[in-house]
């Protein structure tokens, strides 16, 4: 039920199973408690029966971990500590658990050992790294999980790993790559009978700011997840709505959505929703609401202390400040965010700083910040925020033309993914093995790619497609094919 439906009855069933297992098999009982924790996280505000606190209390009162503890045991105890004790007391244990997961992922686990990694990936990493504002861990876990799932042919885990990676790519302004992974995850979920992972689709649609399509997806998702009791997705839909309306400059609507998103503390993106609430409230003339949200945000960001966390907090404080203090805080935010991977938040801070400078008639200084924000947002396809930056640039006296859509942007998500693999030298059989499709389907998609890009062979793809970023891990498609 948890894997295929993620319904709100799963926490009760799993917790009951864990209690019955406790006198028979302590290790399996603890595994099931971790599953119950994940199920309670997904159920969120729509949970019926045991919620996160009740499951965490059961974990703390349940069978003790073995000596030495397994990765599952470290994760279970740290998640229980975070839920019961809060960020200040539970954050250090959760960071240690995240290091354990990363070490296990790097270790080249055997098939038998991968069971623990699957359990960890399926239940906890998706909220942990963002909850700790740890972009390096998020990057490593996201790319590693997809690689391991592909090599093992683990179709039950791969959609979640792909969605997890896609969400990271949204935050690094790689929207097209994120869309390709979302399409692949959706296709696999449909083929295996699982519930589609709509999380990153909602966020990506909000950032792209195609309002009617984004709202249609949000509304349909709200109906679907409400019916099966997946409260976490309901909260994310409200967060996505706030992103959409903040990008469009409709701050009253953004404030209403962000307020709804923050009514329940969903792990992983509650801090993001607080930032949307702070900007919307500050721009809507409600500084008291923004200040209250900032207090909640600072409790989390200070406990984490990463560049991403500190930059986001400084930007939030700048929104509620003025004069030299605001100027210093915006600069501090940008310096922090330049040292992390979350480029979408860097561009957001540059936009806000540029708007602040322009309104104080510091046009030349504002123009530099606004140009950087516009280049980042327009290059990624973040339509609402790009348009905000373009209007502000025009107000400084600079002429800015809207960017035209390149031929590459005409590719579908799967065409873009296949074209990228072909560009990197993979054969049709290798591409088919990675994407779980037939070689004939690969050939058909490549024909469409050649026609749209105006090229006649695979060797010409290198001249029209951007190569992968340095450090992007390459997967071994031959090994993947053998595994499958």
Image (cartoon, rainbow, N blue to C red):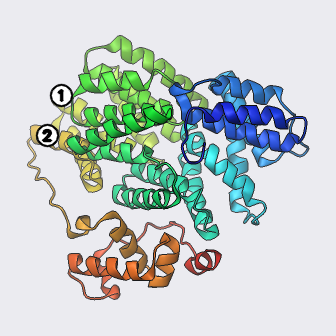
- Residues 364 and 272: in front is 272
Q: Earlier in the sequence, mark 2 or mark 1?
A: 1
SS for tag 1? Answer: helix
The answer to whether 32 appears left or right of 460 in the picture is: right
Residue 410, visible in the rendered structure = yes
Indicate the position of residue 379 as horizontal and vertical percent values. 27, 56
Contact between marks 2 and 1 (CB within 8 A): the answer is: no
Q: Which residue is mark 1?
A: 359
Point out residue 426 in the picture as x, y percentages from the top left corner.
47, 82
Q: Which residue bears the numbered disc 2?
A: 391
Q: Which mark is residue 441?
A: none
Crowd around label 2: few <14 · some 14–19 · many ≥20 (10 Å): some
Out of 201 and 243, give the one closest to the viewer: 201
For residue 340, above or below residue 353: below
Front in this rendered view, residue 41 or 372: 41
Note whether residue 93 is visible.
Answer: no
Q: CA distance from mark 2 to mark 1?
A: 13 Å
On screen, residue 283 above or below 449: above
Q: Is residue 167 above or below residue 449?
A: above
Q: Position of residue 111 (x, y in %)?
A: 75, 65
Q: Which quadrant holds residue 238?
A: top left
């Amino acid at each position: 039920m948890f894997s295929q439906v993620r319904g709100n009855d799963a926490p009760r069933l799993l917790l009951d199973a864990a209690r019955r297992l406790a006198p028979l098999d302590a290790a399996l009982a603890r595994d099931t408690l971790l599953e119950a924790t994940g199920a309670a996280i997904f159920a969120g505000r729509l949970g019926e029966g045991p919620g996160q606190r009740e499951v965490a209390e059961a974990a703390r009162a349940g069978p003790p971990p073995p000596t030495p503890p397994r990765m599952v045991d470290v994760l279970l105890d740290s998640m229980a500590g975070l839920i019961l004790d809060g960020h200040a007391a539970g954050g250090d244990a959760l960071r240690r658990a995240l290091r354990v997961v990363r070490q296990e992922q790097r270790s080249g686990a055997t098939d038998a050992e991968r069971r623990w990694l699957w359990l960890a990936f399926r239940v906890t990493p998706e909220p942990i790294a963002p909850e700790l504002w740890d972009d390096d861990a998020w990057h490593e876990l996201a790319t590693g999980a997809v690689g391991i799932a592909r090599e093992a042919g683990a179709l039950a885990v791969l959609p979640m790993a792909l969605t997890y990676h896609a969400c990271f790519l949204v935050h690094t302004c790689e929207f097209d790559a994120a869309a390709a992974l979302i399409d692949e995850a959706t296709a696999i979920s449909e083929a295996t009978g699982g519930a589609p992972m709509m999380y990153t689709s909602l966020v990506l649609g909000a950032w792209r700011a195609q309002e009617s399509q984004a709202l249609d997806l949000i509304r349909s998702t709200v109906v679907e997840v409400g019916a099966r009791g997946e409260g976490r997705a309901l909260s994310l839909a409200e967060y996505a709505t706030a992103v959409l309306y903040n990008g469009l400059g409709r701050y009253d609507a953004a404030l209403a959505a962000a307020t709804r998103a923050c009514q329940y503390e969903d792990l992983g993106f509650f801090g993001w929703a607080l930032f949307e609430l702070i900007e919307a409230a500050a721009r809507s003339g409600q500084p008291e609401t923004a200040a209250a949200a900032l207090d909640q945000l600072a409790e989390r960001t200070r406990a984490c202390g990463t560049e991403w966390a500190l930059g986001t907090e400084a930007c939030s404080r700048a929104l509620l400040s003025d004069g030299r203090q605001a100027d210093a805080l915006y600069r501090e935010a940008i310096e922090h965010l330049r040292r992390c991977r979350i480029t979408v938040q860097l561009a957001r801070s540059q936009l806000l700083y540029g708007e602040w400078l322009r309104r104080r008639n510091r046009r030349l200084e504002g123009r530099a910040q606004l140009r950087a924000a516009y280049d980042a947002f327009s290059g990624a396809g973040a339509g609402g925020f790009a348009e905000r930056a373009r209007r502000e640039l025009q107000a400084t006296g600079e002429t800015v033309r809207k960017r035209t859509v390149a031929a590459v942007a005409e590719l579908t998500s799967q065409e873009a993914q296949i074209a990228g693999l072909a560009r990197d030298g993979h054969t049709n059989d290798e591409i088919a093995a990675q994407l779980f499709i037939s070689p004939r389907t690969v050939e058909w998609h490549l024909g469409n790619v050649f026609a749209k890009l105006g090229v006649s062979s695979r060797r010409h793809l290198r001249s029209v497609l951007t190569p992968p970023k340095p450090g992007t891990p390459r997967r071994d498609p031959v090994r993947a094919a053998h595994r499958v």
